[in-house]
Image (tube, rainbow, N blue to C red):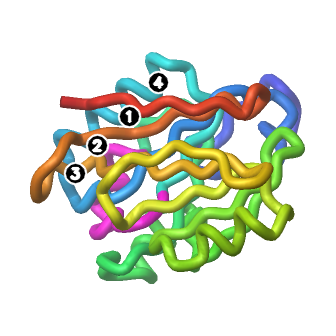
Amino acid sequence: METGEKQHKLHSPVFFAQRLMLIGIISDSHDDMSSMKKAVDLLTAEKVSYVVHAGDITSPFTFEILGGLSCPFTGIFGNNDGDKVLLKEKSGGNIHNQPHFMTLSERRIVVLHEADLVRAFADSGDFDLVIYGHTHSPVIRMQKRALIVNPGKVGRLHNGESTLAIVDIEKMDARIIRLD
């Protein structure tokens, strides 16, 4: 693909891997279309180069909003994702089973939904960035050499704030942003 060619917004080929700096991380959107729209608008304003969803998109119609991203997208299935076949189709094939392994800007990344294996992946020394969701609580911490990020939850269900994370993949620095 040539540099000037337009690409489907949800497809996430390695073409973009050389130019990445900011990654948007979202999780647990649970069909909250209003919050997803805020998240997509904020990630676009922040000029993120890539978006990762750490599970619980829930329904395929959420891609009506995610299709507005101005960058590539990858996600994983969470424990509340319903029609996995249609979710995979609507995502352009960019929703995966967990754990999902990827490399962006030479950083090795693993994406999970539940936190069960976070410590093991971080302790392994094989990953620069460990992303997870499920708990609805934002986390940014270092463990050994790995940056661990849970963006919290985009959806406004239960208690707590609607949040997402942005990671500077070059500096390996992260921040949590409130959507409310």
Marks 4 and 2: in contact by CB < 8 Å? no
Crowding near pointer 1: few (<14 within 10 Å), some, many (20+)? many
Image mark for residue 155: 3
User: Residue 70, position in %: x, y?
Assistant: 53, 30
Q: Label 1 to label 4, Cα distance in Å?
A: 6 Å
Secondary structure, mark 1, is helix
Residue at x 24%, y 41% (from the top left corner): 162
Marks 4 and 1: in contact by CB < 8 Å? yes
Residue under numbered circle 2: 36
Screen quadrant of the N terminus? top right
The amino acid at mark 2 is: Met
Q: Label 2 to label 3, Cα distance in Å?
A: 7 Å
- Of labels 3 and 4, earlier in sequence is 4
Secondary structure, mark 3, is loop
Residue under numbered circle 4: 44
Q: Is residue 13 visible?
A: no
